[in-house]
Image: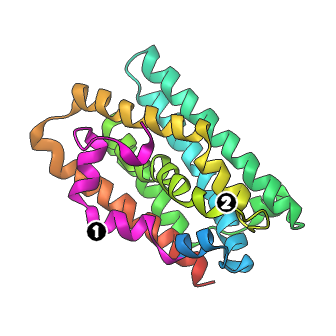
Amino acid sequence: MSASTEPTTTLFGELKKAIADDWHDYTHHAFVEQLGAGTLSLDAFKDYLVQDYLFLIQFCRSYALAGYKGENLDDIQASMEGLQVILDETRLHVKLTASWGIEEQELLKAPEKVGTVAYTRYVLDAGMTGDLLDLHVALAPCVIGYAEIGERLAPLLEGRDDHPYREWISTYASAEFQEGARKAVEQLDALHDRFGSPARFEQLAHVFRTATRMESGFWQQALEK
């Protein structure tokens, strides 16, 4: 099962269905469409990568928080595996930016934009004030959404060895990343079995919608550079 073909009977599928318009706006944002077509300006992409590097640092903190909020060793193990995936993802950013003469120290010195601060701190706040389910619902648009976007854009690489964003698309379309997204879908269901209830769905959908809209804002701030 790929990230984009999960049955709607999963919690993730039901959340996507509940916010369908916002999800489409995020996964088909102009930034994404231009990236897939290879027409996205390099300045916009580089600006996005720098902010995404800073973003991932905060997401590492979110997974560390998930470990703290864990109620058993399985929860802690899952959070550490998620943290390792994010740490691996930062290496892609360092590699890409270094190829353009931007060293890691320069990345660390870059100021966070308003959209970066708002999104990452919202996720952390969802985890601090809620439980593991709240936190992972807030993480889901990024963790699972990027796999869906990568899978959808991958066919656009065919016959395009010169595609400027081949490495980015290939990373999120990779079997490894798709498997991580599949596990994230399953983890949401497992957490919902423990912490969820029909009465909680609207609140979870609100968290999911807010995080999804912030993903769209994250794309947009790069286009507006």
In magenta, the rendered stretch is 1-30
Residue drawn where x is 68% and y is 57% of the image: 168
**Main secondary structure type of the part rendered in magenta:** helix
Q: Nearer the viewer, mark 1 or mark 2?
A: 2
Crowd tier of the residue under label 2, counting other residues whose Cα lies within 10 Å: few below 14, some 14–19, many 20 or above: few
User: What residue would you read off at disc 2?
Assistant: 158
Residue drawn where x is 27% and y is 62% of the image: 20
Percent x, y for residue 219? Answer: 53, 71
- Label 1, label 2: how far apart the Cα atoms are: 29 Å
Q: Give the answer, above or below, for where 82 lies relative to 46.
A: above
Percent x, y for residue 154? Answer: 59, 56
Residue 83 sits in which quadrant?
top right
Q: Is 43 placed left or right of 128 in the picture? A: right
Residue 21 badge: 1
Amino acid type shown at disc 1:
Asp
Q: Give the answer, above or below, for where 129 lies relative to 41.
A: above
Return the residue found at the far left.
199
SS state under label 1? helix
Residue 71 sits in which quadrant?
top left
Res. 114 visible in picture:
no
- How is the model colour-coded? rainbow
Q: Earlier in the sequence, mark 1 or mark 2?
A: 1
